Amino acid sequence: MRILAVDYGDARTGLALCDPGGSLASPLAVIEEKSERELVKKIAALASQNGARLIVVGYPRNMDGSGGPRAQKCEAFAKSLESFSKIKTALWDERLTTKSALAAMNVTGTRGKKRKAAVDSAAACIILQDYLDHLKNIG
């Protein structure tokens, strides 16, 4: 099953997609869009074009597991995306994914504009791979 992951941001949103077997996450795109409505349309179109059957939205919890204002914003975004796309959405804990993505960029020597453009899709990739690994572990 193809799954699309979303690292939702106010200015840039990273996307990742898994292989048809649901084993490996790969970066798909970064969408620079501030309008939530337009962003939902663009993500829904990409999900449809790529045959996604599920959309996993990064869920930014605090380190103590609680949710704050950003988590509430992501919940509302996921609901809007599911309603518009007619593709089921799931929230997935994204704690420390951006830090992990930045660490990976340091290892590969990615700097400057390339780094800024790639970090969001790399974070989406980490979210999706964590989700895929969880699915393997439970079943």
Image (cartoon, rainbow, N blue to C red):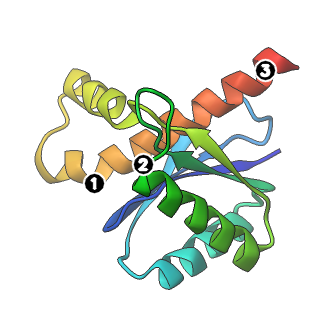
Query: Marks 1 and 3: in contact by CB < 8 Å?
Result: no
Q: Which residue is drawn at the image coordinates 78% and 42% (left, top)? A: 20
- 46 displayed left or right of 70: right
**Residue placed furthest toward the right:** 139
Image mark for residue 136: 3
Image mark for residue 70: none
Query: Which amino acid, mark 2?
Result: Ser
Picture coordinates of residue 46 (x, y %)? 62, 68
The secondary element bearing badge 2 is classed as helix
Residue 42 against residue 2 in the figure, above or below: below
Q: Give the class, few, some or many, for how many residues have Cα within 10 Å of label 1's Cα (few <14, many ≥20).
A: some
Residue 126 against residue 35 in the figure, above or below: above
Q: Which residue is drawn at the image coordinates 38% and 30% (left, top)? A: 96
Q: Disc 3 and disc 1: Cα gap in Å?
A: 30 Å
Q: How many marks?
A: 3
Front residue of 71 and 56:
71
Query: Which amino acid, mark 1?
Result: Ala
Q: Which quadrant is home to the N terminus?
A: top right
Q: Which residue is drawn at the image coordinates 35% and 27% (left, top)? A: 100
| Mark sitting earlier along the chain (3/1) | 1
Q: Give the class, few, some or many, for how many residues have Cα within 10 Å of label 2's Cα (few <14, many ≥20).
A: many
The secondary element bearing badge 3 is classed as helix
Query: Which amino acid, mark 3?
Result: Lys
Circle 2 sits on which residue? Answer: 121
**Residue placed furthest toward the left:** 112
Q: Which quadrant is home to the C terminus?
A: top right
Circle 1 sits on which residue? Answer: 117
Give residue 11's quadrant in the image: bottom left
Query: Marks 2 and 1: in contact by CB < 8 Å?
Result: yes
